[in-house]
Amino acid sequence: MPGFYAQGEYDLSGFAVGAVKKDAVINGSTIAVGDALIGLPSSGVHSNGFSLVRRVLAQSGLSLNDVLPGNENEQITLGKALMAPTVIYVKQVLGMIARGGVKGIAHITGGGFTDNIPRIFPKGLGAVVNTNSWEVPNIFKWIQKSGGIEDSEMLRTFNMGIGMVLVVSQEAASTILSEGDTKAYLIGRVVEGEGVVYN
């Protein structure tokens, strides 16, 4: 995190550990061609890519107190948009798992879609992600425009408005999208090959 910690400063963090029965582990081993990718919305940048965000903010000439460009109707400041608390997906995801058909789960953190989604696939499988299947929040549009950042770098660095991706059967996708009480998007599918292709 270049430029963040001053000499002699440090960061204190915590974590939680859980347990799961062996027969309930979701490890991606049953993922197959044709399975659906379901995306759950993020609340913003989710604490990833802040070295880049800070550089973009510095060169933009704006301050954290300025209104987020493109978001004038809501009058949210850049500071508030950038510091929106990270969504905790536990209840949403557990509800989807209880319905059945969830084969893999990828938390979209640093590395974006490009690095995180392939980690859960068996060898020889990849994904096609339809980037027009959800509305990208204005904070990401502002970062990209102000920083002159290419699409590929944005998709490798940020969650772009999707903080969690579930790989599910087609049947489970229909259930999640039609019956669920959680906002979710059908963002893509599993294909032969490796990596993530965007369209």
Image: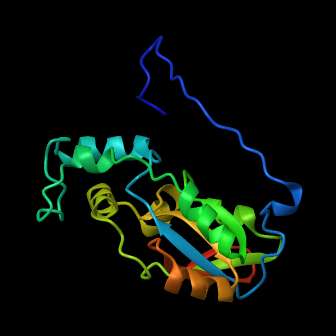
> Looking at this rendering, what residue extends furthest in the top direction?
8
In this view, the residue in front, 95 or 70, is 95
Looking at the image, residue 193 lies above or below residue 86: below
Residue appearing at x 32%, y 60% in the figure? 148
Specify whether 173 is left or right of 5.
Answer: right
Residue appearing at x 44%, y 82% in the figure? 133
| Residue 199 visible in image | no
| Residue 43 visible in image | yes
Specify whether 165 is left or right of 142.
Answer: right
The picture places residue 170, in percent across and down from the top left corner, at: 66, 88
Residue appearing at x 56%, y 80% in the figure? 176
> Across the whole image, how many numbered discs are drawn on residues?
0
Residue appearing at x 60%, y 67% in the figure? 95
The picture places residue 112, in percent across and down from the top left corner, at: 54, 59
The picture places residue 37, in percent across and down from the top left corner, at: 61, 77
Specify whether 69 is left or right of 179.
Answer: left
Specify whether 196 is left or right of 79.
Answer: right
Picture quadrant where residue 198 is located: bottom right
